[in-house]
Image (spheres, helix red, strand yellow):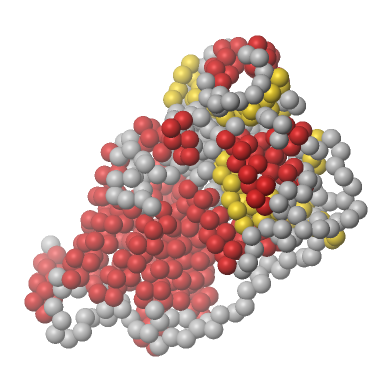
Amino acid sequence: MTRIFNNPADFAEEALAGFCDIHSGLVRQVPGGAVRRHRPAAPKVAVLAGGGSGHYPAFAGLIGPGFADGAVVGNIFTSPSAQQAYAVAKAADSGAGVVFTYGNYAGDVMNFGMASERLAAEGIAVENVLVTDDVASAPPSEASKRRGIAGDFTVFKVMGAAAEAGADLAGVVRLGRKANSLTRTIGSAFAGCTFPGADAPLFSLGEGQMGLGLGIHGEPGLFDTDLPPAADLGRELVSRVLAETPDGAGQRIAVILNGLGSTKHEELFVLWGTVAPLLRDAGYTLVLPEVGELVTSLDMAGVSLTVTWLDDELEPLWAAPAETPAYRRGTTAAQSGSLPAAEVSDDDSTAVAFAATASSREYATACVAALEAARNLLRAEEPRLGDMDAVAGDGDHGRGMVRGVDAAVAAAADAFTRGAGAGDVLAAAGDAWADRAGGTSGVLWGAGLRALGESLGNSQAPEPAELSAAVTAFAGRITGLGKAGVGDKTMVDALLPFAETLARRTAEGAGAETAWQEAAAAATPAAAATATLRPLKGRARPLAEKSLGTADPGATSLAMIFTVMGGQLARHAAPPAAGQNEAGQDEAHARDEAEATV
């Protein structure tokens, strides 16, 4: 387990700072990650690998000539935020465009996609290359849904070498996607990994068991089986990878036998003694194979086998020289033509001027208080949410939500002290939540809070109908980004019942507090009912069967948060205009009194 840390919440940032210090000759830290110490003498495509921390040497350890130009570094097992990706791209861009490359996970796709839109709006050419090598995570007919695991290394290497050789953005992207289409990986775990500060691993296996089909974010394997002798394990891995041989593939292959964090090199060498002969007996020539830790999962005990089928284009790029902190091959060209990198400010934004009415300022205090209530709740529930997420995911939901809400509270309070109204307070909270939390939930909560604030505005405290419309905007932004619906086993399963109940009861004339309470009463059982669903979106999808019986952590946290926020947002809403829905208001008032009596 991870034993060396200060505050567990700061582990990723402190590790990155230490890495950049010890390898200061090759890399420099920038907001959101790290880039090469030296800029190219002439414009070249910037290849930017990215993802959560916990996978060293991926991703920052691969920065250097012949490989990546930079790495966007999120929290442990959590996608970086859109702001982090944007900042690293701005630091690495030398005028020939940038390409983000990362594993196929929902949070990464959203955040890198949003960063790409922002860069493109500024005139910077930008592309994305997703890695989908994990054969266990989806059938061949749904290859686009597969996760990216250790095949990241091969795809990144090909793209980095192509960019170093002078390929343009379109060429680098084409070669990266080609390498991905010819890469297959299968993995197996022997023991789970443990987050800094946690007292137990994210999953455990019985004595003499292994999980086959693991991910790299602390997820368990797709199914457990008896741990076989090395020879049998080698045959299992080779047969599963070769069963996915691409059509028209050649006989020359790049091979990676990868340790996940706690498997010793000697063990990998023993396994290689079976893997290599089996591949050669199948008629393959092994081109510069690699055995070691290249894409890890904290301290997970496990191993994965990656095969990339090479051709005349890909083989020279796989074999090309590279010099990075964690990986070196051959001798790279001297960097005498490089220019010292300009230092990048941690914050190049300008102060925002706020304008708000006294009524909106007063309601803004309720918004800050609502966020504080959510923060207190999430801090208390962090362990439970993490345990729920660990059943079929990476166990980081609780920690990610706490990071997000802590940042949101701080940003909201700061905006309020600078004169912001309710809308701007919530928008600032949303931006900070997305930036600090990262991941799928981070970008969704961030976007949702911003939509809530934009709908409320800064002119007045909302009437019940306006508050309901703002919640509908929150839901619309999240469903638009995440593309999930009711039944997919996501936060949407609790969100839509909440928004729909709030809208219906408000239209019927119920007071804001009553409508909000009834909406929360609809969302809470809806979240609990997700225990019976199989996930159709997100990281839990490949482990759908294991998630049965456990409620979705995102739906659970949303129902809890909306319940406690109502004590401020609904209680301090303005009353409806006089004469509107009087019969409904009388009915709602009678219901309020009856509930109070009970």
Counting the numbered discs, the total is: 0
Which x, y percent locates residue 58?
66, 42
The quarter in which the N terminus is drawn is: top right
Eyeballing the image, is 137 above or below 234?
below
Q: Quadrant of residue 59?
A: top right
Which residue is more in the foreground, 140 or 133? 140
The quarter in which the C terminus is drawn is: bottom left
Which x, y percent locates residue 25?
84, 51
- Asked if one can make out residue 413 in the rendered structure from this viewpoint, the answer is yes
Residue drawn at x 48%, y 39% is 144
Residue drawn at x 40%, y 68% is 451
Residue drawn at x 56%, y 44% is 130
Q: Is residue 100 left or right of residue 387?
A: right
Q: Is residue 537 left or right of residue 321?
A: left
Which x, y percent locates residue 286?
71, 22
Which residue is more in the foreground, 319 or 464? 319
